[in-house]
């Protein structure tokens, strides 16, 4: 991601070039800049390379036509720029522009003087730059710029004060600010110049007014017109976070950004300073000061005018032993106290050191969760890198044919991981470079882009297939091991830059390193002389993964730690869900693909180890023996890994122990991985599948013109698991957003005679008509015993569902319609349903507005001889005391109903009294009764106590969240004498019970021979009350197993 860098200078002798530079389009302007490099100028200028004026690439990259003309004026004086421009235009075959420039040069020779900018030039400037200088680059915190006037051929600012009239102190302050700005500008430009970008890697986005406005808004990302004090820039590796931070610093140094807001801006590279010895904050911010003594007292006197840019904060996080240590320790507030650098930076981030200063922090996405607890009112800015439009333009620069580009991008989109990675320019360059290699053209595009590993493998393989390196054949395996070990050791120690000692320690030889430079696999470190770094983090991750699959020398095998390290990584990613190691593990599995391994062996002159697969399978076998293995695994992540390998045999062996799978499929990447793996889960018993409709919806237009629809094929493959897997008995589609085409495949699988699904759950499934299609397919299904349609607005669908379930072949035992917008009228259909079939034993109707009228209809069905219902859930159905009267009458006649849930209904003492009319009968078969949150008091408790004295069938009684108080619970305890041998679970949570009641409860605990579970949570029991209960628990006669 690039932002504008604007350089202001006086008008000079080359301003006449501006119209010709403005005439270039976006692509031509980039090519023109590239031709200004010294090695390109040699093609049409006979001077030695060392004698060419050198324009820093960072300045060239950011320059618009106007600023480019200024750069030419600065570096090619006395008319030399005209010759350079003509030579570049000739190189670019711009014939018409060449003729115009020659004519202009001829006119200039005749007058022996190159004129300054004309009025036409000024108008051209305004059209080209969109008034960037006077508007677009103005700091929103600055006042309007003074008007410009032209005097004696120079541009001057009206109203400027004579500096000689300033106070000496102000002059001194202005002077050291100027020197600091100049030093920081020079330092940043030098850093950029030292970056070895690929020679064909052009920056496709010119500096624009919009990009500069992005920088202006950086400190007010929410556009509230108030400056945030902690801004966190978040993004993947390589998408432009550091570039953004450096651009912000450079724009301030150039005087076009944050001028009124900040007097000083400090750039702190965490990578550069994390290894420093103990220092003070004052010394730390003085490192870049041009003189020996920085004005610390001035900084301290105006902290609100300071901006600290902290780049790469993940390096501070990972240098700490644990996330807890980030927030440990006493605050640091002394600017002169010597402390570890990490401590100083953490104190700065926590607003302990300079509370009023503004912070701009960059950090990789996966580390944000560790940083958040340390921040004070942060504002996060997401850097996404290349957009889809940027990708199109970038690929067009490489391939030129729009049809070929569309074909390539369409294929890459199928690999979402690779597609998202292309937001980083260097990954995008890797993809283009790989696909442009002549050898790759003979391969199938789909096979190359199918996985990220395959693309990287072919990329590196083709680079080295014809490489001429001064290395003996027997040296290659050792050099690859050295490079891969260096990459892995770097990731272990969270190090991305390596000095000469690191490379020598691993045994990397100079010819091999030079070759890596040549192919842009490595580059010079930005802030470390003589150091190297991998051009992109993904390169380091690929070679780190490769360190596990390379064969080690036989003499080192007995001492090798690679198998143990591999298991640590697998555990971190597949069990602990560590995002840091995920790319390495994915590359590791991808390198297990047999044809990729052979390709790398042939072209890289190395040998892959056959022991790796054995170790991996052994690890999977050990984990499979553990209890609940499928619950321990991050199953979807395992699916991603196995899909990356594309090895069917490996997937079959690794997935043989999986019994339960929970899959959330928001995109194509998850869909393809699940399709590849599910068919190999032969022992799978339960599948939970949440799918988004858009992953299938997007291909509807393509489906009309393409014979192959990869997403629908993957979805149908998943659905076929319901048919081919004989052990799969439970299917949960909750929270799925299905589409017509996806529902069709699902229905075909469910109605297949070989489908063994017995339990189907469809909570919150959209659209609603999907349930109608499903229920029609399930009509007459004798295998289905459990159906859960809760949390759906069924409405008029209820009669259709119940009609289908009345089929004579239907064997449904459990039906859940909770939170389905049922009304009292719906109960008429439900009552007929209950009297028509005898196999329904459990009905859940909670969270529906059934009210007393609806319960009256249901109770009529409960008294029917054919009703076999055993469990009825009626929680939160807006029931009152009348419902209890109907239920009491039904309980007197019904001999099957054993479990009744009436929680969250306002039954009151009167309602409880009605219920107890039936509950107090010895022949009442009710075993479980939930009356929690039913708004009754100790009077209702009195009725329950009396009922329990005559009924010994009740085993579970929940009375929580009712105002029973000590008196009510005391009455209940008296009823639960040793003679009551049934009740084993009693719920008294939040019943306003105090210590005064603990003696009665203690008596029950000591004497009851059945009570094993007691819930007293949410009651105010003091130390004495708990002591009384504990005394009872110690008695041998106490049977209690669980006390809440």
Image: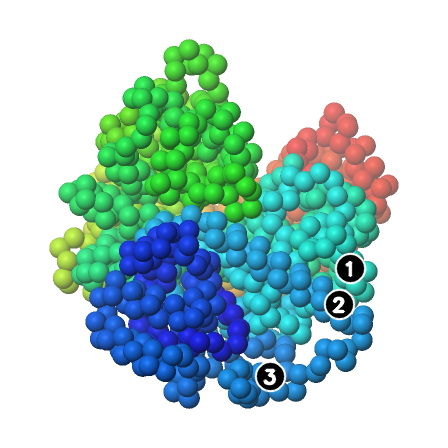
Q: Residue at x 81, y 46 (%)?
A: 337
Mark 2 or mark 3, which has the lower sequence index? 3
User: Could you tell me how far apart the alpha carbons at marks 2 and 1 are, in whole angstroms?
Assistant: 9 Å
One can see residue 241 in this view: no
Tell me the element at label 1: loop
Is residue 751 found left or right of 954 in the rendered image?
left
Q: Quadrant of residue 53?
A: bottom left
- Residue 173's disc number: 2
The C terminus - image quarter = top right
- Identify the mark nearer the N-term, 1 or 3: 3
CB contact under 8 Å: marks 2 and 1: yes
Q: Residue furthest right?
A: 1024
Taking depth in this image into account, of 660 and 314 the one nearest to the observer is 314
Q: Nearer the viewer, residue 948 or 352?
A: 352
- Residue 97 percent location from the top left of the image: 26, 74
**Nearer to us in this view, 928 or 673:** 673
Question: Residue at the location (71% across, 67% down)?
Answer: 175
**Measuring 71% from the left and 49% from the top, which residue is drawn there?**
284
At numbered mark 2, what does the secondary structure look like: helix, strand or loop?
Answer: helix
Mark 1 → mark 3, Cα distance in angstroms: 30 Å
Few, some or many C-alpha atoms within 10 Å of disc 3 (few <14, some 14-19, many ≥20)? few
Query: Mark 2 or mark 1: which comes first in sequence?
Result: 2
Question: Which mark, residue 295?
Answer: 1
**Residue 495 circle label:** none
In this figure, which residue is indicated by the disc labeled 3? 157
Quarter in which the N terminus is drawn: bottom left
Q: Secondary structure at mark 3?
A: strand
Taking the image as shown, residue 173 lies to the left or right of residue 136, namely: right
């Amino acid at each position: 991601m690039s932002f504008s860098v604007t350089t202001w200078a006086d008008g000079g002798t080359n301003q006449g070039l501006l119209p010709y530079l403005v005439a270039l389009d976006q692509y031509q302007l980039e090519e023109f800049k590239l031709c200004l490099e010294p090695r390109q100028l040699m093609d049409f200028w006979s001077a030695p390379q060392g004698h060419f004026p050198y324009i820093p690439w960072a300045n060239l990259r950011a320059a618009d036509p106007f600023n480019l003309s200024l750069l030419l004026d600065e570096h090619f004086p006395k008319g030399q720029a005209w010759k350079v421009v003509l030579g570049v235009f000739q190189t670019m075959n711009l014939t018409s522009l060449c003729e115009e420039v020659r004519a202009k040069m001829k006119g200039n020779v005749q007058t022996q003087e190159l004129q300054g900018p004309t009025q036409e030039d000024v108008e051209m400037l305004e059209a080209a730059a969109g008034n960037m200088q006077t508007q677009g680059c103005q700091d929103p915190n600055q006042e309007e710029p003074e008007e410009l006037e032209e005097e004696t051929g120079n541009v001057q600012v009206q109203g400027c004060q004579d500096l000689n009239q300033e106070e000496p102190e102000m002059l001194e302050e202005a002077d050291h600010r100027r020197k600091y700005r100049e030093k920081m500008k020079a330092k940043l430009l030098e850093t950029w110049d030292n970056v070895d970008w690929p020679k064909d890697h052009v920056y496709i986005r010119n500096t624009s007014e919009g990009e500069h406005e992005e920088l202006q808004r950086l400190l007010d990302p929410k556009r509230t017109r108030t400056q945030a004090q902690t801004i966190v820039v978040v993004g993947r590796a390589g998408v432009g976070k550091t570039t953004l931070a450096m651009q912000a610093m450079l724009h301030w140094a150039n005087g076009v950004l944050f001028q009124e807001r900040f007097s000083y801006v400090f750039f702190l590279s965490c990578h550069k300073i994390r290894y420093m010895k103990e220092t003070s904050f004052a010394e730390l911010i003085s490192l870049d000061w041009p003189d020996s003594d920085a004005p610390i007292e001035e900084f301290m006197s105006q902290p609100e005018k300071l901006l600290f840019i902290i780049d790469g904060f993940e390096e501070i996080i990972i240098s700490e032993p644990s996330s807890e240590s980030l927030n440990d320790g006493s605050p640091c507030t002394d600017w002169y106290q010597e402390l570890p650098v990490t401590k100083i930076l953490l104190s700065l981030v926590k607003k302990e050191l300079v509370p009023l200063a503004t912070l701009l922090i960059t950090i990789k996405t996966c580390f944000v969760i560790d940083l958040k607890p340390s921040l004070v009112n942060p504002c996060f800015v997401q850097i996404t890198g290349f957009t889809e439009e940027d990708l199109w333009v970038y690929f067009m620069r490489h391939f030129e044919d729009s049809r070929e580009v569309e074909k390539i991008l369409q294929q890459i989109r199928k690999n979402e991981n690779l597609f998202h990675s292309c937001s980083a320019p260097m990954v995008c360059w890797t993809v283009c470079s790989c696909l442009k290699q002549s050898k790759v053209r003979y391969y199938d595009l789909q096979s190359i882009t199918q996985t990220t590993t395959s693309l990287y493998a072919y990329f590196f393989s083709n680079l080295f297939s014809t490489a001429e390196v001064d290395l003996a054949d027997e040296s290659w395996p050792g050099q690859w091991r050295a490079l891969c070990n260096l990459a892995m050791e770097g990731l272990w120690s969270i190090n991305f830059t390596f000095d000469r000692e690191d490379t020598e320690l691993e045994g990397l030889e100079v010819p091999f390193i030079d070759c890596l430079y040549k192919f842009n696999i490595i580059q010079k470190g930005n802030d470390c002389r003589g150091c190297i770094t991998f051009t992109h983090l993904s390169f380091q991750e690929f070679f780190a993964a490769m360190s596990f699959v390379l064969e080690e020398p036989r003499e080192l095998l007995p001492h090798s730690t690679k198998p143990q390290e591999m298991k640590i990584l697998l555990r971190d990613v597949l069990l602990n869900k560590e995002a840091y190691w995920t790319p390495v593990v994915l590359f590791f599995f991808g390198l297990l693909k047999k044809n990729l391994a052979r390709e790398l062996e042939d072209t890289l002159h190395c040998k892959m180890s056959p022991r790796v697969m054995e170790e991996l399978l052994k690890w999977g076998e050990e984990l499979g023996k553990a209890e609940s293995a499928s619950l321990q695994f991050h199953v979807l992540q395992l699916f991603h890994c196995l899909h990356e390998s594309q090895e069917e045999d490996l997937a079959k062996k690794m997935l043989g122990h999986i019994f339960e799978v929970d899959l959330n499929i928001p995109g194509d990447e998850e869909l393809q991985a699940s399709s590849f793996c599910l068919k190999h889960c032969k022992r799978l018993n339960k599948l939970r599948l949440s799918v988004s409709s858009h992953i299938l919806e997007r291909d509807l237009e393509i489906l009309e013109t393409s014979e192959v629809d990869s997403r629908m094929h993957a979805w149908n493959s998943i659905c076929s698991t319901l048919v081919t897997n004989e052990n799969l008995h439970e299917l949960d589609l909750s929270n799925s957003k299905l589409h017509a085409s996806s529902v069709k495949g699902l229905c075909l699988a469910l109605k297949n005679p070989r489908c063994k699904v017995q339990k189907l759950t469809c909570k919150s499934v959209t659209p609603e008509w999907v349930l109608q299609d499903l229920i029609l397919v399930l009509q007459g299904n004798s295998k289905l015993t459990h159906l859960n349609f809760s949390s759906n607005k069924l409405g008029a669908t209820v009669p259709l569902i119940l009609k289908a379930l009345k089929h004579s072949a239907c064997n449904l035992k459990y039906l859940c319609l909770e939170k389905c917008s049922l009304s009292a009228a719906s109960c008429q259909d439900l009552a007929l349903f209950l009297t028509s079939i005898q196999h329904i034993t459990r009905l859940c109707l909670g969270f529906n507005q059934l009210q007393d009228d609806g319960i009256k209809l249901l109770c009529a069905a409960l008294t029917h001889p054919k009703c076999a219902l055993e469990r009825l859930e009626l929680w939160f159905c807006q029931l009152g005391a009348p419902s209890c009267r109907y239920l009491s009458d039904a309980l007197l006649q019904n001999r099957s109903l054993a479990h009744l849930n009436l929680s969250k209904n306002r039954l009151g003492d009167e309602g409880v009294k009605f219920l107890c009319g039936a509950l107090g009968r010895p022949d009442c078969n009710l075993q479980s009764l939930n009356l929690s949150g039913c708004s009754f008091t100790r009077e209702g408790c009195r009725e329950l106590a009396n009922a329990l004295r005559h009924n010994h069938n009740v085993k579970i009684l929940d009375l929580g969240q009712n105002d029973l108080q000590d008196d009510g619970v005391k009455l209940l305890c008296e009823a639960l004498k040793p003679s009551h041998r049934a009740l084993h679970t009693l719920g008294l949570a939040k019943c306003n019970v105090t210590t005064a009641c603990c003696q009665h409860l203690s008596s029950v605990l000591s004497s009851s021979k059945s009570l094993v579970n007691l819930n007293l949570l949410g009651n105010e029991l003091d130390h004495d009350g708990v002591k009384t209960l504990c005394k009872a628990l110690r008695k041998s006669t106490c049977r209690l197993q669980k006390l809440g």
